[in-house]
Amino acid sequence: MNIPNSPPWSMRGGPQDVFLRSDPNWPYPVIVAGNGIWLQDEEGNRYLDVSSGPVASNLGHAHPGVTAAMHAQVDRLTFASSRVARTTENIAFAERLTALAGPGFERAFLVSGGSEAIDAAIKFARVHAVRTGQEARQCLISLLPSYHGGTLGCVAVSGDLAQAAMFEGMITLSEKLRAPLSYRPVNGRSPEEDEAAVLSDLDALISRIGPERLLALVLEPVGGLAMLAPPLTITEAETGDLLLRLDQTLVHFEQLAMESLL
Ligand SMILES: Cc1ncc(COP(=O)(O)O)c(C=O)c1O
């Protein structure tokens, strides 16, 4: 493992910095306000938020429609446990979501973020396998590079070799398949040729693992934090009885932003 074990004191930061800061020289402005595409720090400097944070506030900061809905909701109801109750808001949201998702997606499991969604999807796939008598199905395949979130379950499935080196042995890592690289083609191949090569690697990987042991293939249709890894064009039909789990965290954010612009 190539992991530093005694960082210089300057990397340790303030009380909020439990984990090491990746760049100790970064000035970390203290942000006090946000409006539209702008953020403002405590000294009055304004910053154009070109990436909407990590693609998280792409409706803009303090969007009046979002803040009005949040105020109305917290004044009426903040929480009712889904183990024992349903709420009108979640019923309406699930109905809208499943109607948009179309046939085959008649039910939604609501979570509070992308990492939790990935963990839930992996658990759902496993429960489905066990309940249908396919207990051998435990193996996940995902792309290298890829990013699926921050929980240990997501670290297991993300394609990030530094994270994998840190936590290997504590969690069962997914099998990694090289992502097709249409922006930096391998061996001068065209994007289509490279994608075909990756699909052939996938066939070889499935044969090596044994199809009866596979649980799911986890993919980002839009590569985000893993940067520049284009989507692998693959359909449910091509994966046979291997479950295809599409991590649409970024796709949904993009669609939400597009919907709000239309
Ligand atoms: C593709 C993808 N999946 C999952 C996540 C994790 O989402 P969250 O930060 O809401 O847990 C991210 C976050 O950037 C992501 O890009």
Image (cartoon, rainbow, N blue to C red):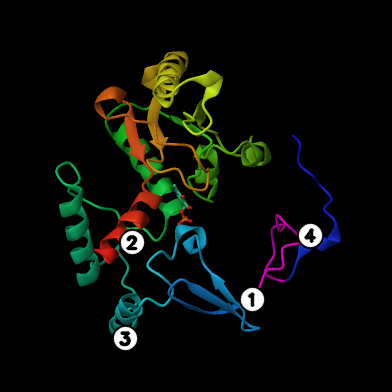
- The image shows residue 77 at horizontal and vertical percentages of 30, 80
Q: For the magenta stretch, what is the residue range?
A: 15-30
Q: Earlier in the sequence, mark 4 or mark 2?
A: 4
Quadrant (top left/top right/bottom left/bottom right) for the C terminus: bottom left
Residue 30's disc is 1
What separation in Å lies between label 4 and label 3 (alpha carbons)? 42 Å
207 up-or-down from 158: above or below: above
Q: Which mark is residue 11?
A: 4
Whole-percent x and y of residue 248? 36, 47
Q: Callout 4, which amino acid?
A: Met
Residue 87 seen in this snapshot: no
Compare marks 3 and 2 and give the one earlier in the sequence.
3
Q: Residue at x 43, y 26 (%)?
A: 191
Indicate whether residue 18 is drawn in magenta: yes
Whether residue 197 appears in magenta in the rendering, the answer is: no
Q: Position of residue 3 (x, y in %)?
A: 76, 41
Q: Which residue is label 2 attached to?
A: 257
* Depth check, front residue: 200 or 82: 200
* Label 2 element class: helix
Q: Nearer the viewer, residue 160 or 124?
A: 160
Residue 213 picture location, percent across and down: 41, 22
| Mark earlier in primary sequence (1, 4) | 4
Q: Amino acid at mark 3?
A: Asp
Dividing the picture into quarters, in which one does residue 211 lie? Answer: top left
User: What number is the disc on residue 75?
Assistant: 3
